[in-house]
Structure formats: structure tokens, C-alpha cells
Image: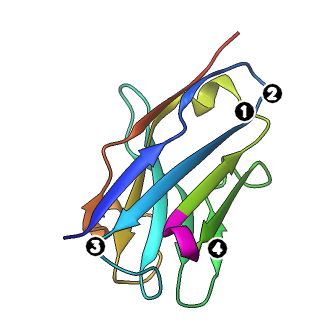
Amino acid sequence: QVQLVESGGGLVQPGGSLRLSCVASGFTLDTYVIAWFRQAPGKEREGVSFLSLSDGKTSYGDSVKGRFTVSRDNGKNTIYLQMNMLKPEDTAVYYCAASLGVPSSHRERYTWWGQGTQVTVSS
């Protein structure tokens, strides 16, 4: 059974950094696409980063380019999202999601989801 568990969220001041983790179980990280999405209150769920595990290619949403970086540790079956230069508008619940398809910003393309971790950027 595929499971994704996020952690690492919290409260951080504007300009600060956080690193989110997504531990995957029930499958090996070699043929999946792993994405990070976020959802702020009253807003649509937004794709933040996309990692194709078969070839290592990454892509990012326009709002986080140059600030967020996705990486993986195969030995730990873990995907990380390093978030730097955080802004108040980055405040949201962050989810990791997995798909057997190609990277996509459309949430319906992802079959497995974690429970989410709250990130709050505030002074």
C-alpha cells in the first residue's frame, strides 16, 4: 500500500527557510512522479514542484522558482522541499503527491496523497 507522510512544517518569519520531508512507503522511488502541492484557505490547490524519479528532471511553479528546491534521498525513500526566502503568501498546507504518469500541475493526475503539513510565514 502506497503511503506518503509529510513533515517539517511550522511557523517561520518572512525571509526564513524551512525544509519539508515526504517519506514514501509501499513503493520504491524509481518510476514515479512526486509533486508538492499547496493549498491556502479559500484558494485552489496549487502545484509547487514536480520531480520525475526516472530521470531526475524537476520543474517548479512560477511563484516559487528560484526560491524552492526539490531533492531526494533514495536510501531513505524521502523527497525534500527546501523553501528559502519565504513570503507570507507561501502560507498554506503543503502536500506531497505521487503519480505513475508524467509531471503535471493538475491535481487529478495524482493518485496518492499525504495528509499535509502546515507552513505559516508571519512576523
Check disc 1 and report the residue beneath it. Answer: 86
Residue at the outermost top position = 123
Question: Mark 4, residues whose alpha carbon is within 10 Å: few (<14), some, or many (≥20)?
Answer: some
Q: Which residues are magenta?
A: 74-78
Q: Position of residue 49 (x, y in %)?
A: 57, 60
Check disc 4 and report the residue beneath it. Answer: 58
Residue appearing at x 79%, y 36% in the figure: 85
Q: Tell me if residue 77 is in the magenta stretch.
A: yes
Q: CA distance from mark 1 to mark 3?
A: 32 Å
Residue appearing at x 60%, y 33% in the figure: 90
Question: Mark 2, residues whose alpha carbon is within 10 Å: few (<14), some, or many (≥20)?
Answer: some
Q: CA distance from mark 2 to mark 4?
A: 24 Å
CB of mark 3 within 8 Å of CB of mark 2? Answer: no
Identify the element where label 3 is drawn: loop
Residue appearing at x 53%, y 90% in the figure: 54
User: 50 or 16, which is in the foreground?
Assistant: 16
Amino acid identity at mark 3: Gly
Residue at the outermost left position = 1
Identify the element where label 2 is drawn: loop
